[in-house]
């Protein structure tokens, strides 16, 4: 029904406009959530432990879908075990100029160059805390954080620590986004000269707040690009282990345009089916390092998940959890139930 009737209508409109409309509509349509839950939530949920966190199932909604934390109740109703909000920056920003989202229908892909458009850490934190009054404690909320556009790379760690501090009480876990291709220079943060300091500063703050509040450390993940060399992936893995991160999310979108059916000159990150093999390879590489390390990281697989087979590929490549986004846009809200229930 979604592919035959609903998606063709949605795809008549500008991608970002219709996305914002749908989010706003469902954020104000709480009366529909019980019905959506009955239709779309998987009948069978197998719990997954990832560090100290327990997820009701192994599929979550990746960052980018709900940048401001206004659709948490919708995500829960659809059966996801978790959602990653963001990317959130310390100060609100508009992002890049429109149009900035483009569908490649023949490739089941999306190109975006949004540029961390969001309401800012203070507003997003309030949105999440307000939503928590209505959602289950077992619904995990991650917050994906980044730097503001005008912050220099050498000072980027200050933005991440500021977001961490402001959003500490709202988030179940944090993801450090150092891999979006849509903020100039951001991917430099994946280089050892910047990354080691960033991870140290955030983890050190984590310890300080935990001690102050007499609570457990927050889980911290690092989201990396699919375009990295093998040596860069190994360096990142070692730095994540050194700084005692919880895990790595593999991967963000790609700047490459390999074997596309549709010709395009649009700049930005490419997600969807063309990304799958690239993200799988990064995941496999990380898994190989995990097997030879005394401090294994939790891996979350993202990129090109449209079917049960795609999901199983991520799990067999070493992922404990899987996140989807573009597959959700193309396949519709029934994708979760089809993957987990068969």
Image (cartoon, rainbow, N blue to C red):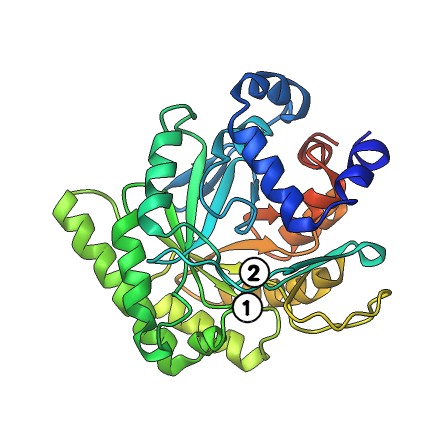
Quick one: label 2, few (<14), some, or many (20+) residues within 10 Å? many
| Secondary structure category for the residue under label 1 | loop
Q: Position of residue 63 (x, y in %)?
A: 52, 51
Q: Position of residue 14 (x, y in %)?
A: 71, 50
**Residue 11 location, quadrant:** top right
- Residue in view at x 44 percent, y 37 percent: 140
Q: Is residue 100 visible?
A: yes
Q: Is 52 left, or right, of 33 in this rendering?
A: left
Q: Position of residue 82 (x, y in %)?
A: 50, 39
Q: Is 55 left, or right, of 105 in this rendering?
A: left
Q: Is residue 171 visible?
A: no
Quadrant in the picture for the N terminus: top right
**Residue 182 location, quadrant:** bottom right
Which of the labelled discs sits on residue 114, or is there none?
2
Outermost residue on the left side: it is: 212
Q: How many labels does the image show?
A: 2
- Residue in view at x 61 percent, y 74 percent: 227
């Amino acid at each position: 029904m979604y592919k035959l009737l609903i998606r063709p209508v949605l795809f008549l409109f500008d991608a970002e406009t219709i996305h914002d409309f749908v989010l706003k509509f469902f954020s104000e349509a709480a009366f529909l959530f019980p019905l959506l839950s009955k239709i779309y939530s998987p009948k069978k949920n197998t719990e997954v432990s990832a560090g100290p966190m327990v997820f009701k199932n192994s599929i979550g909604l990746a960052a980018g879908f709900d940048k401001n934390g206004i659709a948490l109740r919708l995500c829960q109703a659809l059966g996801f075990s978790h959602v990653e909000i963001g990317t959130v920056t310390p100060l609100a920003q508009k992002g890049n100029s429109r149009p900035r989202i483009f569908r490649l229908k023949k490739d089941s892909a999306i190109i975006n160059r949004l540029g961390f458009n969001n309401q800012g850490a203070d507003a997003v934190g309030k949105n999440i805390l307000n939503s928590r009054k209505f959602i289950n404690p077992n619904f995990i909320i991650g917050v994906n954080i980044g730097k503001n556009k005008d912050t220099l790379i050498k000072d980027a760690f200050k933005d991440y620590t500021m977001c961490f501090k402001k959003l500490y009480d709202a988030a179940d876990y944090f993801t450090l986004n150092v891999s979006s291709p849509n903020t100039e220079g951001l991917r430099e943060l994946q280089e050892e000269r910047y990354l080691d300091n960033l991870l140290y500063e955030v983890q050190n703050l984590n310890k300080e707040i935990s001690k102050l509040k007499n609570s457990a450390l927050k889980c911290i993940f690092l989201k990396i690009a699919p375009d990295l060399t093998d040596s860069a992936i190994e360096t990142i893995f070692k730095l994540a282990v050194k700084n005692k991160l919880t895990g790595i999310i593999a991967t963000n979108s790609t700047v490459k345009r390999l074997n596309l059916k549709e010709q395009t000159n649009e700049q930005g990150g490419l997600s969807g089916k063309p990304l799958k093999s690239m993200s799988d390879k990064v995941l496999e590489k990380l898994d190989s390092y995990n097997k030879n390390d005394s401090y294994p990281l939790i891996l979350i697989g993202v990129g090109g998940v449209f079917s049960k087979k795609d999901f199983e590929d991520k799990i067999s490549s070493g992922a404990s959890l899987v996140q989807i986004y573009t597959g959700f846009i193309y396949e519709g809200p029934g994708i979760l139930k089809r993957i987990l229930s068969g």
